[in-house]
Amino acid sequence: MDKLVIRGGRPLHGEVAISGAKNAALPELCAALLTAEPVTLRNVPQLKDVSTMFALMRIMGVQADRTADGLVHLNAGPLHDPKAPYELVKTMRASVLVLGPLLARFGHAVVSLPGGCGIGSRPVDQHIKGLQAMGAEIVVEHGYMNAKIAAGKKRLRGAHITTDMVTVTGTENLMMAATLADGVTVLENAAQEPEVVDLAEMLIKMGAKIQGHGTHRIRIEGVDHLHGCEHQVVADRIEAGTFLCAVAATGGDVLLRFGRADHLDAVIDKLHTLGVHVDVVKDGMRVRSDGAASGELRAQSFRTTEYPGFPTDMQAQFMVLNCVAQGASKVTETIFENRFMHVNELVRLGARIQIDGKVAITEGPAALSGATVMATDLRASACLVIAGLMAEGQTDVERIYHLDRGYDQIEVKLRALGADIERVKA
């Protein structure tokens, strides 16, 4: 098992290329199931979750190949078994995204219920409810969702669906299923995330008729079939946000190539108030900071919420900044019930944080000192890396398999910016 060894205290300088977004790549890989024609994706990140999705595709009979530079070729024409087994689905919740496309194209699918998640419950009941409204018959038994189109029907039917909560994967699953449904489907209370928009744009290239993506109301007019396409995965806004926070903390001047500032408005607004300079440039974003050691950073309170609000996936990284900035701050987590698991590890490094239910209160500035810490989830891993980049002495971050699920060679990118960081066998 690998760990990261970080010796802190170095500012970051240079430029880094932001990889394609995991949360866009995964549903877009599933979208290839909607057609028997070849699909090509560019800028697909080299991540554990992507490898898991590839394994799932191949076990179902999809021809799937990729290159080291992020080019992926998919052909679901030979797909022979529309079944997603537990052995793969249990390791990645996004595997449930095969349900809508398989049901829409083949009329039936068997998909394992996804396993638990360390940061909180993410139920699939909204997926099932929406597909049932479109005419699917779904029985959950022995840990699997057995789905089929109602007897006597060849296709799903359009429906007006209002989800009980904003769900990104639910919106994506239902949107993909609706592209091949008979009639018009309207998704109310739809997720507005850039990854949902990017998926819709890919589906439109495949011949889908979609309007309203990027708003709370998406309209999909079903078509008889979809064709292949080429599509470039949008840049990962959470990876970009993580690097913004890293530079803010350590100090420095870094160009984030391909970074989309328009996808990070809530985070950048807080960074500006904190005392960090973020500018839009031709190739992406440029971030400049004097770092926490300057004493110029001012702690910021915030509340996580659905896009375009402050993203829960940036809560842990920004909390590190609050720990070393001047003053007290309050962070309210509204999305996941267990997303403060990184707090105890930050306290081991010297942070002063108190938790009261869904609220974490930090007192800064704290002087962080290196220690051995353990990652508990994907974004917690990133926050501990940022903390290690600032801490005095050596920080060992263990259980970084979480990190590999969502960051494409983060230690290589940070080292290129001047960080003293290396991956070693634990």
Image (cartoon, rainbow, N blue to C red):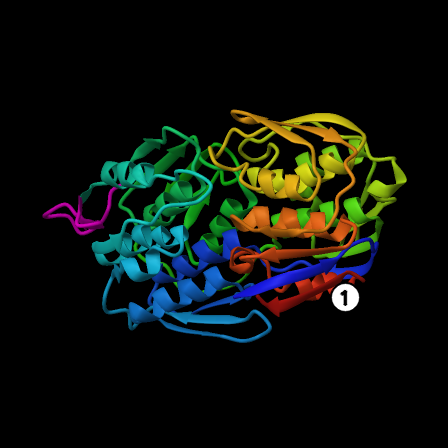
Kindly state the secondary structure of the residue where label 1 is placed: helix
**Residue 350 occupies which quadrant of the picture?**
top right
On screen, residue 245 versus residue 23, left or right, reads right
Position of residue 275 in the picture relative to residue 267 (left or right): right
- Image x and y of residue 109, in percent: 22, 55
Would residue 288 be found to the left or right of residue 97 on screen?
right
- Viewed as shown, does residue 208 lie left or right of 340? left
Q: Which residues are magenta?
A: 140-157
Q: Position of residue 169 (x, y in %)?
A: 42, 44
Question: Quick check: is 131 in the magenta stretch?
Answer: no
Q: Is residue 188 visible?
A: yes
Q: Quadrant of the C terminus?
A: bottom right
Mark 1: few/some/many CA within 10 Å (<14, 14-19, 20+): some
Asked whether residue 237 appears in the rendered view, the answer is: no
Task: Say which residue appears at 61% left-offset and 48% top-offset.
Answer: 238
Q: Amino acid at mark 1?
A: Ala
Seen from the viewer's position, the closer of residues 31 and 81 is: 81
